[in-house]
Amino acid sequence: MKKSILNKWPLLAFLLLPGSFSVLRADEGMWIPLLLDQNEAEMQRMGLQLDAEDIYSINHSSLKDAVVIFGGGCTGEVVSDQGLVLTNHHCGYDAIQYHSSVEHDYLTDGFWAGSFEEELPCPGLEVRFLDRITDVTDAVLHDLDAKLPEKVREDSIRIRSKRLAGPFEAEGYEARVVPFYYGNQYYMFVYEVYPDVRLVGTPPSNIGKFGGDTDNWMWPRHTGDFSVFRIYADSANRPASYSPSNRPYKPEKHLSIDLNGYEEGDFTFVLGYPGSTQEYISSYAVRLIEDVMDPMRISARTERLDVIKAAMDRDAKTRIQYASKAAGIANGWKKWQGEIKGLERLNVVGSKQDYETVFQDWCSGVNGKEFAGILPALKENYQGLEPYLVMQIIFQEHILAPEAVSFAYSFNLLHDVAKGTDSSMSLEDALAVCKEKAGIFFKDYDPEVDRAIFERLAFMVNADGTREQVIDFEGSTLEKQLDWFYGKSVFTSRERMEKFLGNFKESSYKALERDPMFKYAQVVFGQYVNQTYPFIRMYNARIDSLQRLYMKGQIRLKESGDFASLMRVGIRNDIPLSNVGSEMLYPDANFTMRVAYGQVKGFEPADAVEYAPYTTLAGIMEKEDPDIYDYVVEARLKDLYARKDYGPYANALGEMPVAFVGTNHTTGGNSGSPVLNGDGNLIGINFDRNWEGTMSDVRYDPDMCRNIMLDIRYCLFIIDKFAGAERLIDEMDIIKPVWYRGE
Ligand code: ARG
Ligand code: GLU
């Protein structure tokens, strides 16, 4: 059925006006805020009431001034004139865990500061405001000949980038020059970094992480995935390290919150920091992801999770120790499974191959001849890369699966300082570093679990179920090795480690050299560093420069207008839309600020299944299971539900909305991003994607790809009605719903 529609596509393509393509594929794309003029008309057609300048401007305050990079890999938004920030619970997780102890278990119980004084400093946590974006392509690339050796090119770019960033850094900003379109363009991002960020509030895990890993990447979803922080600044409102005398930061701009919700089909946009996508890679690269990398990682993690989950089920202490590790391992594990299914379903390799046929044909003509050699060279280099990639995954997912291996390797510093081959720090300092590391490591470490992981991951399970040994025991048996590692090494026992560090003196480096795990770590890291990594680096460098040209060629092909005439000569038509339709190609994500826009919209994940676009508190009650950790519901929430005590946070139907889905194109890093309505007011917080759509990092499918957002009404309901933190509600600018105001 689908196929026959697609087969008519070329015909349709000639009937439609070029402009109408962009309407068809409005949902795909992560756009550069600086260039939003190009999207403005389409966004307005879809429901935006603002101008591009209201979203990004360097002349006056704009929405981008209320959006921050939160920590190392998330997004957050400012929602009050006192520097209050919202982000996801899973983004604030480390800070929440840092402040949690047996006496104050904020992870389990939640936390709400009752005053500014009670807000908790979070060492190491920073937020970054984007001051400006500038196109520095000419300054970075001028007269760099395409034939320059890659190394020379890279060095020149590094020097030029540094020169460009210099004046901003001298004024205390952070400036990063970032490649776009695989190095065909460069933009500079200037940030202001605020290092005093404090924890203000978080719901208990059974709200913030409701559904846990079972519901992760899934719709319908009921996770209250948010936490609340505040930015502090010095008395001049400037960035400053933590000090008790710092004050709440007065932002240039903060978002208003609209409790009027949305209807299916309503326009939404997301402003945030998507981390990485690969929409323009070749079929060879997609095949590697789909047939090699994802399956190997999934299979290794299935084994690892098997061991961990069994241990967690057996023992409450292990459950707590391994909860966060298991979540991290399972997050990728589950995503890659969805990704493979999506790539298969869309036949992305096949359609990329078709596109490549068109591309190669085009290369025999005048416009494309400079690109003629690229695809064959890419193919050759991916073939060369593959065995090393396999070795890399074995290293990462098998050899490093037992945690004691990397832990032991991290003691090289202490070894070198003690032996006198590294004088970068004193022995006391190196010892102090290791003592701290060991404290953190053993807090969440169970040697029996680690041993079981080692035993299991010494083998790789092939697609046909056979097991293949991937770790070498050098003439010994696995059993003997394990007895030795887990019975003798200081890296697998807190007691042995404490004794070892307690008596450490300069000559102790010799004892380290005799330690079985330390020795083993030297061998496996040595092999990786000498036999795998150099080849990975070499092939990747070649692929990078080829991909840069390939990207340039794809842009050229599109701009040349040759595409339509090539399609006429019988090339199959289900070619990547991202390479055909719109006026321009959006650049792959690279953890710089982007605008994604689309609509609130449900989807049909499978035959006869239809998903509504939002969930409600009733669904939490349906999922409740007091015996399953991830589905426990607190009495207080049940009580609010029973009394329907929702205040202004209910929708017009009297329901308490929890989460919703839309067609905004997002990826990892967009967690915590503000979801805005046509007026630019906050209606949600992005936190996930649907499982069926996780291939959107490689190929976006408007039918199946959805971003998952927390409804801001549920967030405020929890803050206000559940936690009673009215002081936070009072500082926000809230637009009450029409039904509540009685209009
Ligand atoms: N899938 C989301 C993301 O990629 C949420 C991950 C955290 N939640 C979890 N249950 N592991 O970050
Ligand atoms: N949870 C993801 C994050 O941390 C967002 C989900 C995704 O789109 O990959 O950014």
Image: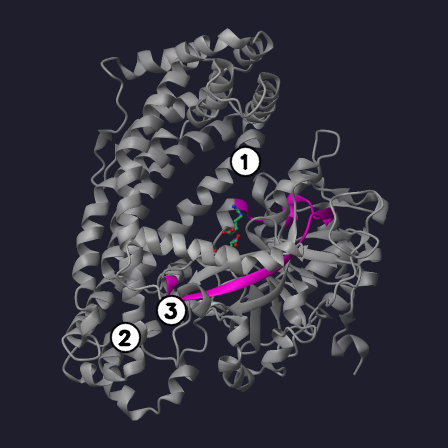
Residue designated by label 3: 701
Report which quarter residue 140 is drawn in.
bottom left
Residue designated by label 1: 323
Q: Is residue 253 magenta?
A: no
Q: Residue at x 57, y 43 (%)?
A: 630
Local packing at callout 1 (Cα closer than 10 Å; few below 14, some 14-19, many 20+) is some
Earlier sequence position, callout 3 versus callout 1: 1
- Span shown in magenta: 183-212
Earlier sequence position, callout 2 versus callout 3: 2
- Taking the image as drawn, is residue 588 in sight? no
Earlier sequence position, callout 1 versus callout 2: 2
Residue designated by label 2: 2
Residue 676 vs 148, above or below: the answer is below
Q: Which is nearer the eye, 720 or 573?
A: 573
Instruction: Give the distance between the C-alpha atoms of the residues marked 1 and 2, in whole angstroms.
Output: 42 Å
What residue type is disc 3 on?
Asp
Q: Which mark is residue 634?
A: none
Local packing at callout 2 (Cα closer than 10 Å; few below 14, some 14-19, many 20+) is few
What residue type is disc 2 on?
Lys
